[in-house]
Image (cartoon, grey):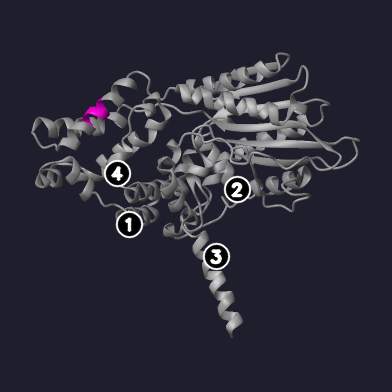
Amino acid sequence: MRRHIITLTFALAALATSAQIPRQEIEQNILRSASNYYAYPGPTQEELTPSPKGYEPYYISHYGRHGSRHLIENSDFDKAYKTLMRADSLHKLTTLGKDVLRRVTILREQAERRHGELTLLGAEQHQGIGGRMIRRFPKVFEGKTRIDAKSTVVIRCILSMENALHAMLRINPELDIRHDASEHDMWYMNFHDRDLDKKKMPDKVKKVYDEFCKHHQHPDRLMNSLFSDSKYWKHEVNTQELTFHLWKLASNLQSTELRHTMTLHDIFTTEELYDQWLQTNAWWYIHYGPCPLNGGVSPFSQRNLLKVIIQEADSCLQLPHPGATLRFGHEVCVMPLVSLLELDHYGKQIADLEQLDDEDWSCYKIFPMGCNVQMIFYRPVTGQGDILLKVLLNENEATLPLQAVDGPYYRWDDFRDYFLAKLATYKD
């Protein structure tokens, strides 16, 4: 009996340790509460698993998000700015409220006519990613290697591509680079499936999501710290909208050069930031993850992209020195692609939104600014044997839903067969 009690104690301790990892990580670094506005942290895995014996890397297929950017819409700044300006004109702001208005004004002015554009940090992120790719896999990029790079037609993606390519050229000036950004490729580079979009948030799912959000919305403390008249903010202010836009400004500040001189995170408690992250994390899970509440089909929005990745790999793998295929796009492609590939545990279906953090389904680990999926292909040096691959998520080795050959290495034939069969189950 004593042995069973000890075993149960250890099991409960292990469960407690694994539960709510995101909460612990956000407490350690509040920048993670930014969700898709989290600035790319770089790889946490310094040393990759060595190539299997008798194998060498020889081709890379990649899809990555643009680097850090300014917020995209005027409303991202104006919602908070105009709400606070009106209150200030009526003498309804506290001293803190006035200072927050000052900071929001600075943020608004520095982003003027730069909405959605790549920041200096975003350029640096892709220089780092490109440089690490070529240094980690020098065999792939030897000599006059062909690099086929494509971007969506959005300028922040084009500039991200160019920064990555320039970093590679500095290391190997012999690279034969072809780069392009055209509407011709948007059917897979940034595909929007309107029919699938309609299925993401039907009324029954919206009701569940709204109830979840209501449980995690506690605006009173923040509102009382900003406004001097509680009657005013209760009757005149959309508290959730203001909270959301202040969180958005606070989150994206880390992607700008203003991060060196100011912050907006100080107006929130850690618990408030965590609650805002929970709501955003759930929204992304429903819209782009394998959420069973809407049938779990959202990841199939990237079926065209995965088909092209497989087709182009099959073609390139026939070449003696295929080099790399690099693609630069958006987080709305990376997240469903990661779920479609079932990388790590991100293909898991979780019906209870309250359990997302317990299951460590963390959007900031999937798609920070600059996020990327890299597929590294390995061939036998002798020419005899299976083609192997491993997948990196944000430059860290990830697992696939397949039988591994050795550590993070899988057979390309197994990958192709599994995912072509999976893609065939989805009917347009």
Q: Quadrant of the N terminus?
A: bottom right
Asked if the residue at tag 1 contacts the one at tag 2, i.e. Cβ–Cβ closer than 8 Å, the answer is: no
Q: Nearer the viewer, mark 2 or mark 4?
A: 4
The Cα–Cα distance between marks 3 and 2, rounded to whole angstroms, is: 38 Å
> Left or right: 241 with respect to 136?
left
| C-alpha gap between disc 2 and disc 4 | 43 Å
Q: What residue is rendered at 26% in x and 52% in y?
A: 218
Q: Above or below — where is 148 with respect to 274?
A: above
Q: In the rendering, at what x and y percent does residue 136 appear?
A: 70, 31
Which residues are drawn in magenta?
A: 101-105
Q: Which residue is mark 1?
A: 211
| Rendered residue at 48%/54% (across/down) | 21
Q: Residue at x 15, y 41 (%)?
A: 227
Q: Amino acid at mark 3?
A: Ala
Q: Is residue 306 left or right of residue 183?
A: right
Q: Which mark is residue 426?
A: 2
